[in-house]
Amino acid sequence: MSLIESIILGVVQGLTEFLPISSSGHLVLGQYLLGLEEPRLIFDIILHVGTLVAVVAYYRRDVAQLVFGFRDAAEAIGRGQPRSALESTGARLLILICIASLPTAVIGAAIDTWLNLDRSSSKAVVFVCVALLVNGCILMGGRFAGTDPGPGSEPSSRSLALWGITPKIALMLGVAQGIAVLPGLSRSGLTITSALLLAVWRTEAARFSFLMSIPAILGALALKFEPGVFGSSAGSGLLTVTAGATAAGLVGYLAILYLERTVADATFHRFSWYCWGVGLAGLAAVVIV
């Protein structure tokens, strides 16, 4: 793999991982329609590390809150006062993310086991294109959804609810994130739109969605990791791998910034036009080819 190819793959990874247009779907379409090769396992892992760094860097204050929240919860439990942990915003946020991660892990693993698509086949392309059309409909469905906090909206310090997100809502968002494992469906698209439809504050829907993605990305990396995988990096070149990861991280950071603005400005649904266009073009290409 050349340096230019590495950077291009990093840019594509950074864009499609966070924008609501499905990174897995674009990988399938790229393999079938453009003849692009799937990145080697080690390179794919490193690209995901780059996007993970982008999320952590962008939401570094929230991530710090999660770390301190874990500390506060551990100290409260150690004192025999687990309820007092809820006084910490970081602990409440940590609990909500854990609640969301449970259905994601179960549903994601089930779909990964059940779905057996040859990603280089026309059947996989048709599946992805239909899923992209559905993804576009989901995004458009959130056009008039979403709220902003009003006076007195902040929950009490002992309430587990945070940013308009209750444990029940966190659980439903985790289900949406698990379903988004299907290629062609977007993780950010499903979770943010679901949050908006559940009346989560518009300014916080994207924020919680991306914080949810941290354990999801870590879980995906754990599933992909195999013993000796780093031994397969011989020949990849340190510069080539670093360039790809850096491109993924920088572009991913900018993608998060842009996506947050589209959610706040109520223009998030416009990505549906792109999904519909790519989905229809992909179906047409399968028929022609």
Image (cartoon, helix red, strand yellow):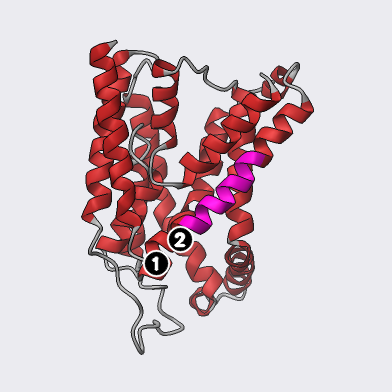
Q: Is residue 99 above or below residue 243?
A: below
Q: If the image is split into quadrants, where does the C terminus sit?
A: top left
SS for dot 2: helix
Neighbour tally class for label 1: few under 14, some 14-19, many 20 plus, Cα within 10 Å:
some
Q: Residue furthest right?
A: 238
Query: Which numbered tag is attached to residue 201?
Result: none
* Residue at numbered disc 1: 264
The answer to whether residue 190 shows anywhere in this view is no
Q: Residue furthest top?
A: 289
Relative image position of residue 35 (x, y in whole percent): 46, 14
The one nearer the camera, 80 or 18, is 18
* Residue at numbered disc 2: 260
Residue plotted at (63% across, 42% down): 50
Q: What residue span does the magenta drawing correspond to?
A: 247-258
Residue plotted at (52% across, 40% down): 219
Relative image position of residue 208 (x, y in whole percent): 45, 61
